[in-house]
Amino acid sequence: MYKKIFIYLFAILIICVNAYASELSVQTALERREVYTGETFIFQLQVSGSEEPEEPDLSHLDGFRVQFAGGSQNSSSSISIINGQMTREEKKGYIFSYRLTPLKTGTIAIPSIEVKAGNMTARTEPVVIVARKPTETEDFKLRLTLSKERCYTGEPVILTVTWYIGKNVNDFNFSLPLMGDKRLTFANPEVDTQSGKKLYRIKLGDSEAIGEEGQGTLDGKRYTTISFKKVLIPVKAGTIPIEQATVTCSALTGYSRRSNDPFSSFFDDDFFGSSRRGVYSTVVVPSNTLSLRVLDLPAQGRPANFNGHTGRYHIEAAASPLNVNIGDPVTFSIKISGPPYLDHIDLPPLKDQPAFTKDFRIPDERAGAEIKGEEKIFTQTIRPLNSGVKEIPSYELPYFDTEKGEYLVTSSVPIPLTVNETKVVTLLDAEGTSETPVTGTDIETSGKGIAFSYEDMSVIEKEYLSPIACFLNGPWPYMVFTPPILYLILFSGVYISRKRNNDPLKILSRKALNVLEKKLHEAEKATPQKACVIVLDSFREYLGIKLRLPSTGSVTFADAKQHLEAMGIEQEIIEKVKDLFYSCEAGAYAGDIRFSDNFSLTKNALDAAMELEKRLK
């Protein structure tokens, strides 16, 4: 009997545990199941049954580059009333979003993914996608070039990525698989931001680059170009394949005719435009492939003071002042030129140069290096130790010449220097060494007082004390003028305070732009969907304050448009505000991200605010 009861209770326990565990479930959602190799798509894990699940491990996804795009709660609640009975239903949920980029062509499986929440566990069903090979067209081409295809470890090589554009595009996204290669370190070369060219901030996984718009010719055809550079610094010898890069864009591929229905045309944004509408499709453009051969630096002939400088180097030295006393500071600077990339180059300390430590005192501190054009300048203070120093010696820099394949030494030209003796001032120098007494008439005291120095009383001038002088010399001016002055100060303070209290929105209006800028700065660090929410909410609040609306946080574009048109704001600026509202709402509520990165979104918001700031005083 007890055995049956135990089995019965155990069965109930198993059923309860299974029922409890079944509360957690997870499903996959893909933006599309057919993509191109190198094309990024959105992949989501939609969790039900928990608002705080653990972030799953996607490291086992073979054939994809995975980038976490953030997570957000997806909970909801509803109330229904049937025959007077109220029922409340709550659903807890969470969504993990990822950007997946297939790295190979063909059918690629996304295996089952485990999600945990507390002591509950759920798994997804495996799914597959088809990655097609991208093909080049006459309208779009992508080219990779290297400054050299053979280098040594530690030698910078410049990779240039150039996209040739023959049609209108709306948006684009680069994929550069090379950025994940651990045999290389990467850096960005300096970009001239004052050139007047249009610049783009291009995301490359966890890194980024600055692209420039320009013009170029390829195979005899003229194109608009967007190009950027990355510095590759190899850390290991061997052949490094530079795999195919891709750029995904929304390109104009054709036109469609508008409806002949006059009523539908009336509500079209392009009512006064042409009868054709542009059709944009996703296009993936592949690049060529390259390889970089990296050689080890030879051990034979390597100088003992070699510090890893590779390439071709030239140095120049300068100093000031050149006429000093012993111990006076001399500013010594060295200019290094030659390599195409200078940012990672450091200068070996002067203390490692015996010619300097012999005649100069060298502090441990050194000023920060400065890059000017194709030169890097290092500055150091030195102090001569004796008057026998006649010159600042040459500074030597050993390096490996990658063109000649041998170790060389470049050195600066010695700089003539005049060092004067420093006279040490003693107590005797300060008091004088002569003991000769001072001669002259002895000073005598007169019993007749100071009047004995004068011959008569005519030198004493008579003074008369007037009432005005008495008033000015006494405390009376302070007693008469201080109360009115204090009254005016207090009256001005009260007047200003009352004026501010009468119009508090005016104070908020002056601070609205600063508040918006701080919020936009926060949005730059958030996920794309979260950035849309922050930008939308902060811009609504900004418009509500500037337009003096009663509910600043719930301003819609329709509300703003009505007030902006009434104030005579130009239609072009209103369109900017409209585009900002619509792109943020699409990203915040529908997950439709229409911008390349957070920086471009916040820049559009700030530009629109600056235009409004000039007109809404």
Image (tube, rainbow, N blue to C red):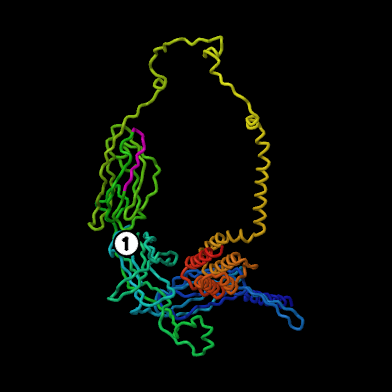
- Image position of 263 (left or right of 180): right
The span picked out in magenta is 325-334
Of residues 471 and 189, the one nearer the viewer is: 471
Q: Residue at x 64, y 28 (%)?
A: 466
Q: Quadrant of the C terminus?
A: bottom right
- Disc 1 marks which residue? 157
Q: Report the amino acid beneath label 1.
A: Val
Outermost residue on the left side: it is 404
Please identify the dominant SS of the magenta region.
strand
| Residue 121, visible in the rendered structure | no
Residue 468 percent across, percent down from the top left = 64, 31
Residue 249 on image: x %, y %: 42, 75
407 or 415, nearer to the observer? 415
Which of the 4 image quarters holds residue 144?
Answer: bottom left
The residue furthest right is: 84
In magenta stretch: residue 326: yes
Percent position (x, y) of residue 401?
Answer: 25, 55
In which image quadrant can residue 461 be found?
top right
Residue 575: x %, y % from top left: 51, 73
